[in-house]
């Protein structure tokens, strides 16, 4: 991250021209909340994916709650961080998924302990309401992401697909739908991991990874 240029004077007066014992240093990479948001988001998502593919029994679904709380908490931190940098879309995405995981934790605990007065026969329909609400927003985030890197649109798109499959599985439960939903979750975890490695590389002074051209080009007047 430190660049020491030749000691010979450089023609002109551009930034970085050095002579004598002066040392030119590259500016540190700009702070990027994605270095926090992406791995944190993956934590609870991996647990959800394993749950959907049946890696641990459905009766132990409460085991995901602590992961959901930790994920929600630090996504909230990332949202505040992005807002402080003026990165409105990033803050919006982080805030939405923070709300999802907070909501997941509260709803799961509430359903297990009967906090909300929802009868056992209506738990499935109430869960569908929760999922539909976030599915609408996830679809909007996917549309909005089309002016960003292709890898991010793919990431959000798989999240939307996963929520859709989870919703369908609550309407008509089947092992096939649950496995497909779990696979979609694990795929977007892998994409998120790819994006994190790229962001971490930049944060450490290295190159980014290819992200692909946006599906929609920049606006031209």
Image (cartoon, rainbow, N blue to C red):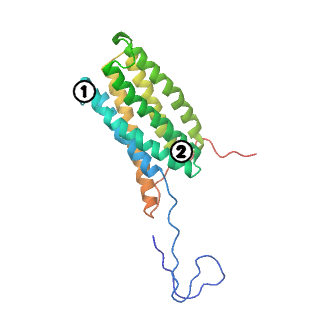
Q: Position of residue 151 (x, y in %)?
A: 49, 44
- Provide the secondary structure element on which disc 1 rests: helix
Q: How many residues crowd around disc 2 within 10 Å: few (fewer than 14), some, or many (20 or more)? A: some
- Res. 45 image quadrant: top left
Quarter of the image with the C terminus in it? top right
Question: Image check: 193 left or right of 29?
Answer: left
Q: Which mark is residue 90?
A: 2
Is residue 166 depicted above or below 76 in this figure? above
Q: Is residue 169 visible?
A: yes
| Number of dots carrying numbers | 2
Question: Does residue 45 appear in this view?
Answer: no
On residue 78, which mark appears? none
- Residue 67 is left or right of residue 1, and the answer is left
Residue 40 lies, with reference to residue 100, above or below; the image says below
Who comes first in sequence, dot 2 or dot 1?
1
Q: The N terminus appears in which quarter of the rendering?
A: bottom left
Instruction: Please give the name of the residue rendered at 39% of the width and 33% of the height, measured from the top-left corner.
Output: 184
Q: Residue at x 64, y 84 (%)?
A: 11
Question: Rounded to the nearest whole Å, what is the CA distance between mark 2 and mark 1?
Answer: 33 Å
Residue beneath the point at 46% across and 34% down: 99
Q: Position of residue 36 (x, y in %)?
A: 42, 49
User: Residue 221 versus residue 71: which sits nearer the camera?
Assistant: 71
Residue 53 position in % (x across, y down) = 29, 29
Seen at 49% across and 28% down, the residue is 134
Tell me the element at label 2.
helix
Q: Which residue is mark 1?
A: 60
Q: Position of 170 compared to 18: left or right?
A: left
Residue 61, compared with residue 152, is above or below; it is above
Which quarter of the picture shows residue 98?
Answer: top left
Q: Nearer the viewer, residue 123 or 164?
A: 123
């Amino acid at each position: 991250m430190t660049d020491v240029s030749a000691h010979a004077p450089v023609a002109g007066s551009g930034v970085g021209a050095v002579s004598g014992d002066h040392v030119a240093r590259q500016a540190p990479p700009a702070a990027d909340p994605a270095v926090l948001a992406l791995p944190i988001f993956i934590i609870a998502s991996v647990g959800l994916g394993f749950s959907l593919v049946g890696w641990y029994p459905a009766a132990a679904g409460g085991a995901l709650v602590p992961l959901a709380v930790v994920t929600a908490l630090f996504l909230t931190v990332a949202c505040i961080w992005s807002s402080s940098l003026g990165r409105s879309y990033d803050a919006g995405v982080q805030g939405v998924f923070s709300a999802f995981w907070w909501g997941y934790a509260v709803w799961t605990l509430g359903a297990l302990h009967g906090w909300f007065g929802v009868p056992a026969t209506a738990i499935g329909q109430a869960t569908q309401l929760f999922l539909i609400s976030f599915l609408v927003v996830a679809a909007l985030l996917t549309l909005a992401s089309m002016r960003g890197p292709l890898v991010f649109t793919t990431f959000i798109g798989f999240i939307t697909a996963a929520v859709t499959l989870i919703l369908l599985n609550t309407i008509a439960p089947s092992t096939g739908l649950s496995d497909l939903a779990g696979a979609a979750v694990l795929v977007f975890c892998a994409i998120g991991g790819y994006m994190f490695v790229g962001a971490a590389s930049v944060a450490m002074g290295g190159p980014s990874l290819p992200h692909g051209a946006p599906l929609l080009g920049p606006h031209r007047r």
